[in-house]
Amino acid sequence: MRDARSAAPPPTIAPGRERSRLSPRERQIAVLVAQGFPTKAIAWRLGISVWTVSTYLRRMFARFGVQSRAAMIARLFEHGLL
């Protein structure tokens, strides 16, 4: 039996609210991900822990309904966030 949560469509971003969806730190991390930097390098460049970068990524994945860095970046470009 399938869980009802797994059948739900991924969340979408409401028009006009796109810019408010990323904090300044999330934007920094997303830009570095888009440039191909691994988590450890992002942490070093921003002066934060690897755990913190991973937490930001997990939260952004959940918010945008994606499961990979590539899908997250595609979604951000699709909605004009990058």
Image (spheres, rainbow, N blue to C red):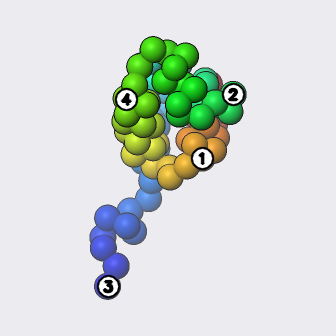
Mark 4 or mark 2, which has the lower sequence index? 2
* Few, some or many residues within 10 Å of mark 3 (<14, 14–19, 20+): few
Picture quarter containing residue 79?
A: top right
- Seen in the picture, residue 69 relative to 50 is either above or below; the reply is below
Label 2 amino acid? Answer: Gln
Q: CA distance from mark 4 to mark 2?
A: 19 Å
What's the amino acid at mark 3?
A: Met
Marking on residue 1: 3
Question: Neighbour class for label 2 at 10 Å: few (<14), some, many (≥20)?
Answer: few
Label 2 secondary element = loop
Q: Which residue is mark 4?
A: 52
| Amino acid type of the residue that numbered disc 4 sits on in the rendered structure | Thr
**Image point (68%, 33%), residue name:** 36
Query: On residue 71, which mark appears?
Result: 1
Q: Which residue is at a point 55% across and 49% down the rendered structure image?
A: 68
Distance between mark 1 and mark 3 Cα atoms: 27 Å
The first of marks 3 and 2 along the sequence is 3
Instruction: Tell us which disc is closer to us: 3 or 2.
Output: 2
